[in-house]
Image (cartoon, rainbow, N blue to C red):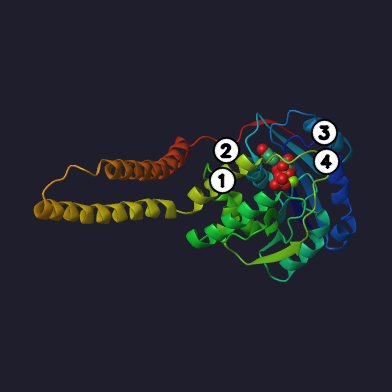
């Protein structure tokens, strides 16, 4: 018998916990047919509602359900990492609690692994039910990442994946503090089969991602998986050096040929403010990387556990 572990990060998902369990159990026939046992890890990411209690209720009637509670909200990335550490399965699946990652796709994903793939990943091909601006920026982000990063990132990719033990160990070997899981999955490589599905709206509750949070998250993705912005800063520096070199020559020649009419105050102000703006911008880019390095060298734990059942 092989073991399949499912990891479900939950942040205030009290209402979705039992729904997810029910939906997951609908695969019972598939599990039996393929000689699979399963374990279900709910990772309670510091929820303020009754998420932990809801999971405990399930644990009382089904020993295959487990709970790991964090001491506070550490974010979905930390929850996924903790789940991957806890999971003992030969196959591991990461799934959202809100049923936006339909458990009914599991059989198809499992089939891909039987075909010799190491990982079955999912991407949604529609973004229906999502604000237009958000979809637009999401697309821009993936286009940009394709250019500036070597880690494969696919538009519409979800964190919903089924992996073999080998891939799980590879992902766990990346112990970085700034975890951008989408990038990490792409970075580790392995043969990945992409399955497509239409966007499903969340079952209960609200998304935890505001536009602003997503924006910050995308910066996280860029700085974690690309140093292109640093190169861009250096490039800007070179451009402005060249420009000022020509300006110096121009000024000297003009002085030699026409004397020094003391005009040019407005243009001077423009140039100074433009260049100091660019300088600050580039300094900001360097600062972002410095901040990441700072957090990384502290080597703080990625999460802290309050309770494990
Ligand atoms: N989540 C989490 N910690 C957080 C935010 C979210 O564990 O700080 C979980 C959440 O409970 C859900 C999954 O991550 O199971 C995806 O969150 P959400 O549905 O809010 O994101 P969306 O599907 O809108 O991208
Ligand atoms: Mg969701």
Q: Residues within 10 Å of mark 1 (few under 14, many from 20)?
A: many
Residue at far bottom of view: 115
Circle 4 sits on which residue?
204
**Distance of mark 3 from mark 2, alpha carbons?**
24 Å
Q: Residue at x 74, y 59 (%)?
A: 126
Image location (x, y in percent) of residue 306: 68, 29
> Toward the viewer: 136 or 34?
136
Image location (x, y in percent) of residue 2: 77, 58
**Distance of mark 4 from mark 3, alpha carbons?**
19 Å
Q: Is residue 151 above or below residue 16?
A: below
Horizontally, is 267 left or right of 91 in the view?
Answer: left
Query: Secondary structure beneath disc 4?
Result: loop
> Toward the viewer: 233 or 109?
233
Query: Secondary structure beneath disc 2?
Result: loop
**Distance of mark 2 from mark 4, alpha carbons?**
28 Å
Q: Residue at x 29, y 55 (%)?
A: 238
Q: Is residue 53 above or below residue 232?
A: above
Image location (x, y in percent) of residue 141: 57, 54
**Distance of mark 2 from mark 1, alpha carbons?**
9 Å
Horizontally, is 289 left or right of 302 in the view?
Answer: left
Circle 1 sits on which residue?
179
């Amino acid at each position: 018998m092989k073991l399949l572990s499912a990891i479900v990060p939950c942040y205030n998902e009290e209402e979705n916990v039992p729904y997810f369990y029910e939906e997951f159990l609908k695969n019972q026939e598939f599990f039996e047919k393929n000689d699979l046992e399963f374990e279900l890890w709910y990772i309670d990411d510091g929820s303020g509602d009754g998420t932990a209690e809801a999971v405990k209720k399930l644990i009382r009637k089904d020993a295959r359900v487990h709970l790991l509670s964090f001491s506070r909200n550490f974010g979905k990335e930390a929850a996924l990492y903790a789940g991957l550490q806890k999971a003992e399965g030969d196959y591991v699946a990461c799934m959202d609690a809100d049923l936006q990652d339909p458990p009914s796709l599991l059989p198809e994903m499992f089939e891909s692994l039987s075909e010799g793939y190491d990982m079955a990943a999912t991407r949604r091909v529609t973004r229906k039910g999502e604000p237009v601006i958000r979809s637009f920026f999401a697309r821009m982000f993936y286009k940009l990442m394709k250019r500036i990063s070597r880690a494969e990132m696919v538009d519409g990719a979800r964190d919903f994946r089924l992996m073999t033990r080998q891939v799980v160990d590879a992902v766990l070997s990346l112990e970085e503090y700034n975890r951008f899981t989408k990038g990490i999955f792409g970075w580790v490589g392995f043969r990945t089969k992409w399955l497509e599905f239409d966007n499903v709206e969340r079952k209960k509750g609200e998304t935890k991602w505001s536009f602003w949070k997503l924006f910050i998250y995308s910066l996280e993705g860029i700085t974690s998986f690309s140093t292109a912005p640093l190169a861009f800063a250096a490039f800007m520096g070179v451009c402005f050096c060249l420009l000022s070199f020509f300006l110096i020559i121009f000024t000297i020649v003009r002085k030699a040929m026409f004397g020094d009419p003391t005009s040019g105050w407005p243009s001077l102000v423009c140039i100074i403010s433009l260049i100091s703006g660019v300088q600050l911008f580039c300094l900001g880019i360097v600062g972002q990387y410095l901040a990441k390095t700072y957090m990384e060298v502290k080597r703080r734990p990625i999460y802290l556990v309050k309770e494990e059942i």
